[in-house]
Amino acid sequence: MPTLMVNAQPTSNPTSNTTPNSTSIHARPRPPKRTFGLGLQLQSTERSESINKSYERIKDAAEISYMQRNWDEWQNSHAISYDEVPFARSKGLKIYVALDLLSYDNPRANLLLANKKTGLFSDAKVKADYLALVQEIATRCKPDYFILLVEANLYKDKNPADYQAFKRLYPEAVALVRRYSPATKLGVSITYGDHNGHDGLDAEDDAYFKNCVTDFDENSDMLSVSTYPFFYLSPRTIPTDFLNRMASFSKKSLFVSETSWVSEPFDIDLPGGKKFKFQSNPETQAEYLRKLEESADNALLQKRKIEAINFVSLNDPKPLSVSVFKMINPKFAWFCSLALSENSGKPKPAYEFMKAWKLR
């Protein structure tokens, strides 16, 4: 699940309700050939259209089918993810799987295991069960890409002792995947953003990110990064060198493991009981994809290696579920509009842009 990183004291809101101006984009010098993959996820819940229709639409906009699931979703004997792997491959899609194991009710302080139980990597049984799960996924899915822990650095922030236990365990998990699915490219995802809340990326944020990357880089095949750069408030203020800067922290290829931008406004709680309305709309979401395209072109021109850019969701949740979710978890309301299509399957402008991007 994505992590919100927005400056706690925004002073302006440049995101507008107008259609983004694409003239400057088309006036840019001829971009380099796209040499990286595009990925899109069909999430495991809240589906309103047929699975065949959903994967046809993923195929139209991407080359990679992205499946990020929690322990329960992978462990369940009727786990749809395993059934969907051959279905996605039949559409010509590569397979990217990810283990989303960190808890949300006690944010990122422990692991959320099967059957809604919690645990720690330092526990011998949890360690054995984790390795068994990794082996099963590697054996049954033979994924092209495998993220062995989503947003691992957030565990470092909340539970540094057990984070160290995971660091020690990581080479064992890597060895298992290499044995049962040798062609799979591996990593753990690290969040890249305004970690210290000081109004945008600075040297302290980069130092933090570099340290986290170093924890896993030696045993990883790619630099896997989760990023939702809402701290810029508008896609238009994201620097063109955003991905180039991100990629500079490793010699491995950059793998944007998950990203997106909201397509509707949401409230942010500020100190003193105040609220800030983060403004967005479907056109602004599409502008984020345009900015990523421009940033990726810039990174390629700087000789950076990019493996893939993956978007977190094809379809939004059902409207009723959104209403309930916003009531129960208002601070996560922004998560409800990250998808590139409405729940019905009606494409947003971002999806249409991604289709054109794929053809480049």
Image (cartoon, grey):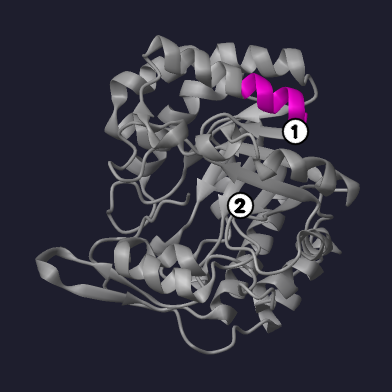
Residue pictured at 42% horizontal, 66% vertical: 334
Which residue was labeled with disc 2?
A: 44
Looking at this view, is 279 or 11 the one in front?
A: 279
- Mark 2 falls on what kind of element? loop
Q: CA distance from mark 1 to mark 2?
A: 17 Å
Label for residue 174? Answer: none
Secondary element under disc 1, as helix, strand or loop, is loop
Which is the main secondary structure of the residues drawn in magenta?
A: helix
Please name the residue shown 27% across and 41% down the image: 106
- Which quadrant of the rendered structure holds the C terminus? bottom right
Q: Give the mark, 1 or 2, whose residue is nearer the N terminus.
A: 2
Residue 209, image x, y percentages: 43, 36
The residue identified by callout 1 is: 143
Residue beneath the point at 80% across and 65% down? 53
Q: Start and end of the magenta stretch?
A: 134-143
Work out whether 250 lies above or below 26: above
Q: Nearer the viewer, residue 327 or 34?
A: 327
The amino acid sitting under disc 1 is Pro
Q: Nearer the viewer, mark 1 or mark 2?
A: 2
Amino acid type at mark 2: Ser
